[in-house]
Image (tube, helix red, strand yellow):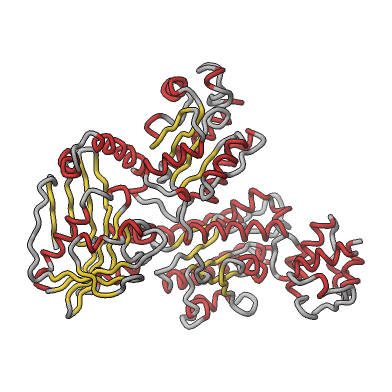
Amino acid sequence: MACAKKKIALLSNITVDMVAAKLRGKYDVYIPDGFDTWVQETVDPRSGFYSGKPDAAIILLDGTEARSWKNRAEAWERLSLWKQALSAATGNITDIPIFLTTIDIRENRIKAYSERKYRLEIEDDWYQFIQGKAEEKGNVYIIDLADVIADIGREQFYSNKMWYMSSMPYSRDGLNAVAAEIERALNAAFTARKKVIALDLDNTLWGGVIGEDGLDGIELSNHKEGQRYYDFQRQFLEMKERGILLAINSKNNPEDVETAIRKHPFMVLREDDFVSSKINWENKAVNLKAMETDLNITEGGFLFIDDNPVERETVKGGCPETAVPEFPDDTAELLPFAEKIWADYCRPLRVLGEDRKKTDLYRNEEKRRQEMSVSLNLEDYIARLGMTVDIHRMREDELDRVAQLCGKTNQFNLTTRRYTAAQVRALAENPDNAVYAVYSSDKYGDNGLISVVILIGSECGVKIDTFLMSCRVMGRKLEDVIIDELAWHYKDRQKMTGEYVPTEKNAPVRDLYDRLGFRLVSGQSRDRIYELDTSEYKKKSFDSYKEIRFKG
Amino acid sequence: MDKFLDFVAEIMNVDTSDISMDTRYKEGKWDSLMMLTLVMELEAEYGVSIPMESLGDVKTMADLYALIK
């Protein structure tokens, strides 16, 4: 789907034309005219930095100028100026992501062994400052540029020639690395992250073949050779704790694998860490398709890791939307391989409490599915689950989660309006409007905040501006309950208007308002408008629900 | 030489036929920013290091080519 390029504003104390040139293929990049005008841009509220209304801002600071600083006092002076500029920028921009960078100070080296150096204290103070901003503001994030430079090495990262010719100190490698790091950050801000990592086992999570080498024969330990796999597994555990779901897609006998996962002393990932296991002799693309259905996650949400190129090709062919990274030839490189997967495909701007519980949520979902298979019908299923629903006005501490759902919900999303946290707050603060947060839970656990309704009030009734629901609770009549409560609550407003704006992914709710008794008033094909006459609304009863709480 | 022009054309994002050894610096897409990019990319492609002082004398594509030979 073609959409307008996102606008990026890039400020720096070096000339960043060449960095901007690298980003321009994908983004519309603003950089101010003139050298070292960035401080001015941040403090002038009418500057191009602000007036261009960017979708994200980046302030890229470089420490090469330290080579000409005269002393420690000058270093602290510069630092103080930079802090003022950053405070201005983060004070003025509150509704779009701003990325700040850590700094590599290239201190003048003409010093005796006994002389005090300031490089480390400046770098540390700078980090404390930007980290403080990130913790204080919901839209400030850090790109750890100094870490990138350390990885590449200064010799290779910088070019004296480029510095003196263009006031841009990066070498070709340095420039590419900076552009790639910025692109990763922008991807985290603007593109959907992978949700599930499906892993092969033999020669992927351990060395060797469990069916042949046995429990004692596979390579997996906490030191030397076996540690390659131990460390590799640890990376995935860290990802799981940040909301990535893990699954197994392996050609093996289930009993052999079960022994390894349960009994191997150095297995990091255990049964509870996986949301789905396909351990069989089936085609791996077929297995992935089955996982998509089980988890209700589309093909594009998956990433598949396998050491075997034949299996990778099978999956690339059968699931073209699934990411299938090349596996390193040298297994000593497994840990950095995992880090790269995280950085390129998974790393989010922020991890919320809901994300940390995600694996448990999906595992409970599996138990629910089993409950469903023995239920007589939907009512019976809902009754067996012991469902409770809580609908209330959004509280301040729920804002991030509400914005997260606005940002990523595709299927059950009637209008797909991608509000940011600041926009949701603004909507909620208007007394004519109401933002509702919906929670559900059942005997298998708490589903958390799973649905959002944003109502816009006016003289002619209330309009459902946004109605969305996490796909994992779809199909339990929750939408019926929510609309029933709202229609009843807003009965005296005479009319409730609903809207359906079709997207590539929200077909599942195309006929939702028809089913809920709304009347189609316009838009047979594209955007449809519906109305419900609430003045004569009769409250429905949902006997199969254990408890329904509503607070208007 | 043809390979050089092909490479330069690719970096400049123009057709090979649009440039020649006689193309002059500061003409068309060959501005100072493009000069920097060319130096970077040519150094990597040809495994050479172009001394900074020699760049001041580059007036044409042929001058640039002389630096990487």
Residue at image location 52% in from the left, 41% down from the top = A304
Answer with left or right where residue A97 lies relative to residue A339: left
Image location of residue A72, percent across then percent down = 61, 62
Please count the marks in the image: 0
Does residue A542 appear anywhere in the picture?
Answer: yes
- Counting from the top left corner in percent of width and height, residue A237 is at 45, 37
Q: Is residue A306 above or below residue A534?
A: above
Left or right of residue A542: residue A425? right
Tell me where residue A158 sits by quadrant.
bottom right
**Residue situated furthest front in the rendering:** A524
Q: Is residue A73 above or below residue A128?
A: below
- The picture places residue B41, in percent across and down from the top left corner, at 77, 62
**Residue at horizontal 46%, vertical 34%?**
A248
- Quadrant where the C terminus of chain A is found in the figure: bottom left
Closest to the observer: A175 or B27? B27
Q: Position of residue A395 (x, y in %)?
A: 23, 60
Closer-to-camera residue (A232/A322): A322
- Name the one closer to the observer, A369 or A168: A369
Give the residue at x 24% y 70%. Answer: A520
Residue A419 can be seen in this image:
no
